[in-house]
Image (spheres, coloured by chain):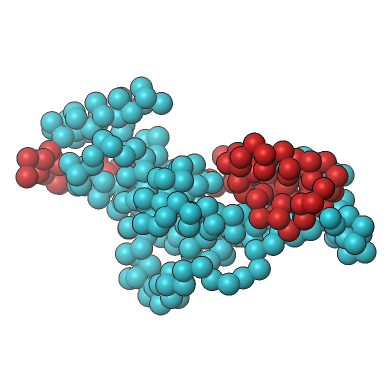
Chain colours: A cyan, B red
Amino acid sequence: MQEDRQHEAELIRRILAGETDVFHELIRPYEKRVYVTLFTMLRNESEAEDAAQEAMISAFRYLHTFRGDAKFSTWLVTIAMNEGRQRLRRLKRAAEDSLEGTVEEPEGDFTPALLTDWREIPLEALERKELRQKLREAVISLPKIYREVFVLRDLQEMNQEETAAALGITVTAVKVRLHRARMMLQKNLVPYLQGSVPARKSFFGRLFQ
Amino acid sequence: MNLKCKNVWEHISEFLDEQLTPEKRREIENHLQNCEVCSAVLDSTRNVLILTADDRTYELPVGYSKRLHARLQKAIHQMPHPGKHSRN
């Protein structure tokens, strides 16, 4: 980890010293991360690809502003998110999204879906391609404030502090939103994870504590 | 056992992230041992996370990397190199 960081710092130093082609090497490990971040924001493959290219070009242009106190990957994802936001505005989808963004903590039901026959479900269910498709759809349909946190924490595997910094929110807000995002996804995906048999309500009285 | 299911759900996320105090974690583990519903909630949420982390869930468009580097190559050679600003 530490070595990666040192290696990156060295690559950055070389790029800033004029070996600009080294930039290709610097960003190679993060190509997918940048694309996925933008895909979950823009919800469209070709738009996300174009935005990813622009984000990488911006990263090159502003590389001199990168401070080694943050991880390069975090910095890059932040640039990608800025690119995504600009595009959302340009695409006039902003009305919907900024409205969502102003709602600090929307009211809602964040309880999980309940099921009683879970133990019988084979883990192989996770291998189904359809399930991955359903997950992508479910992530994309999360309200923006939950989607952003979920993408950074569970997809990009950024830690709480990095996520809070990238989004300009508190660590507590990160925790709350992540929990809600996960519960919404669980609820949305349980019918597919579960296979066929829905949970039987009559059992709850007995099983609840 | 005085922990209600609803209280367990509220902590599922922290439980999975191993952010609970040892006492809280023990309380929840005890509850889980006796509660099929909450165990299923925990397992299914964990599966969502496993699926999210699966490399195959999000795939890059075919040729993405090649196009990205081609465009970068072009852009890099049209721009002044970024180190030029570094002493501002």
Q: Horizontal and vertical percent for residue A108?
A: 62, 70
Q: Horizontal and vertical percent for residue B10?
A: 66, 55
Q: Which residue is nearer to you in this view: A205 or A9?
A: A205
Q: Is residue A158 left or right of residue A108?
A: left
Q: Residue at x 40, y 42 (%)?
A: A31
Residue A50 can be seen, yes or no: no
Res. B32 image quadrant: top right
B19, above or below A102, in the image: above
Q: Which residue is nearer to you in this view: A114 or A190?
A: A114
Quarter of the image that includes the C terminus of chain B: top left
Q: Which residue is nearer to you in this view: A205 or A14?
A: A205
Q: Residue at x 37, y 24 (%)?
A: A2
Residue B73 can be seen, yes or no: yes
Q: Residue at x 40, y 39 (%)?
A: A30
A14, above or below B10, in the image: above
Q: Horizontal and vertical percent for residue A131?
A: 69, 51
Q: Is residue A116 left or right of residue A138?
A: right
Q: Residue at x 90, y 62 (%)?
A: A205
Q: Which residue is nearer to you in this view: B42 or A122?
A: B42
Number of marks drawn: 0
Res. A25 image quadrant: top left
Q: Horizontal and vertical percent for residue A23?
A: 26, 35
Residue at the extreme top: A3
B74, above or below A190, in the image: above
